[in-house]
Image: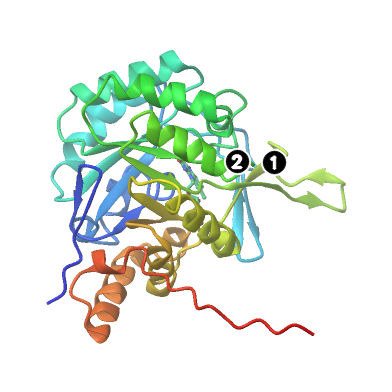
Amino acid sequence: MVDLSVDIGGLSLKNPVIAASGTFGYGLEFAQYCDLSALGGLIVKGLSLHPHRGNPPPRIIETAAGMLNAIGLQNIGVDAFISQKLPRLREHSVAIIVNIFGTSVEDYVTVVRRLSEAHGIHGIEINISCPNVKEGGMIFGKDPKQAYLLTRKLRELTSLPLMVKLTPNTSHLCEVAQRVEEAGADIISLVNTFLGMAIDVETATPLLANVTGGLSGPAIKPIALRMVWEVANVVSIPVVGIGGITNAGDALEYIIAGASAVQVGTANFLNPAVCEEIIDGIEKYLRDKKISSVKNLVRSLKIPSYETTSD
Ligand SMILES: Cc1cc2nc3c(=O)[nH]c(=O)nc-3n(C[C@H](O)[C@H](O)[C@H](O)COP(=O)(O)O)c2cc1C
């Protein structure tokens, strides 16, 4: 028997595989395709204080080894989630993590307050990294000071585990991570999508109505993996790796690089049972390698020293 369980920043997960926000609906939509109780956790679509219609279509484009999306955080709002979705979601034995966003600090504050009073939520993921909304979102995540102030404010309001989700669209990634840790975050997750665009050359117009969108899927994996490794080296709170994971091998790379758990996003659209397959694959790897616990694999990267030749 191998132990797949992980405890990250106050969240106890039966295994390290979590379905990523925005790619798994409110969880319930996937119940007919996979056993929600088999997952380590699931993160619901980003919620705001009021319902959001999101951006106009077209808002999804397929790209080489990935996709661009500019959904613009369409959601039913925090109150409708608590009254309509949460009671049915609670029937599944899975860690429920709620992803939230706001266009102002006050919005985030009110949403965190409402979620903290609700019953059956295991953790909150704070999205300070959405590239597809004009206000808020990524603005907080690009600037270390703003990220610090927002995290500190929300930390004061709740005892639920706080996972702060970082954007890769900044040159201050490690500094943002360190400031978020200092402000009291329990967990850091990264990455959200990379800002990108696509053009229809016949009409010379953008393929997305929003002009730009967020790139996800296998195309981003090597860059996201490098970022997770860098961040895991500069913080001491657990890091959750996200970006282009489609199989157990991808997930294991993140864990070896320093992630205590992983999130699977775009791959759910191709195969709604992919998370379960990844969990089985991690278990098989551990068994084959005779590693008793997945925790032993976290940050196990060995960097060989090569002899340099001078000529
Ligand atoms: C269609 C779509 C919607 C998304 N919505 C959200 C969201 O509401 N909140 C959030 O934090 N991330 C959102 N994301 C980002 C994903 O959770 C994830 O960070 C990103 O897609 C990278 O992982 P992947 O390559 O496995 O998809 C969304 C991604 C996609 C593709």
Question: In terms of image quadrants, where is residue 253?
Answer: bottom left
Q: Secondary structure at mark 2?
A: loop
**Element under disc 1:** strand
* Coloring scheme used: rainbow
In the rendered structure, which amino acid carries the disc numbered 2?
Ala
Near-viewer residue (263 or 261): 261
| Residue 271 sits in quarter | bottom left
137 in relation to 38, above or below: above
Q: Residue 257 falls in which quadrant of the image?
A: bottom left
In contact (CB < 8 Å): disc 2 and disc 1: yes
Out of 242 and 63, give the one closest to the viewer.
242
182 vs 102: above or below: below
Can the viewer see residue 77 in this picture?
Answer: yes
160 versus 223 height, above or below: above
Looking at the picture, tell me which residue is in the foreground, 296 or 265.
296
- For the point 45% across and 38% down, the residue is 178
In the shown orientation, is residue 187 left or right of residue 128?
A: left
Residue indicated by mark 2 = 70
Residue nearest the observer in this picture, 109 or 81: 109
Is 114 left or right of 267, judged from the image as shown? Answer: left
Q: Which mark is residue 155?
A: none
Q: Which residue is mark 1?
A: 212
List x then y, in percent, for residue 91: 13, 45
Image location of residue 256, percent across then percent down: 39, 67
Question: Across the whole image, how many numbered discs are drawn on residues?
Answer: 2
Residue that lies at the very extreme toward the front in this rendered image: 310
Is any atom of residue 127 visible in this view?
no
Q: Quadrant of the C terminus?
A: bottom right
Q: Position of residue 119 (x, y in %)?
A: 15, 30
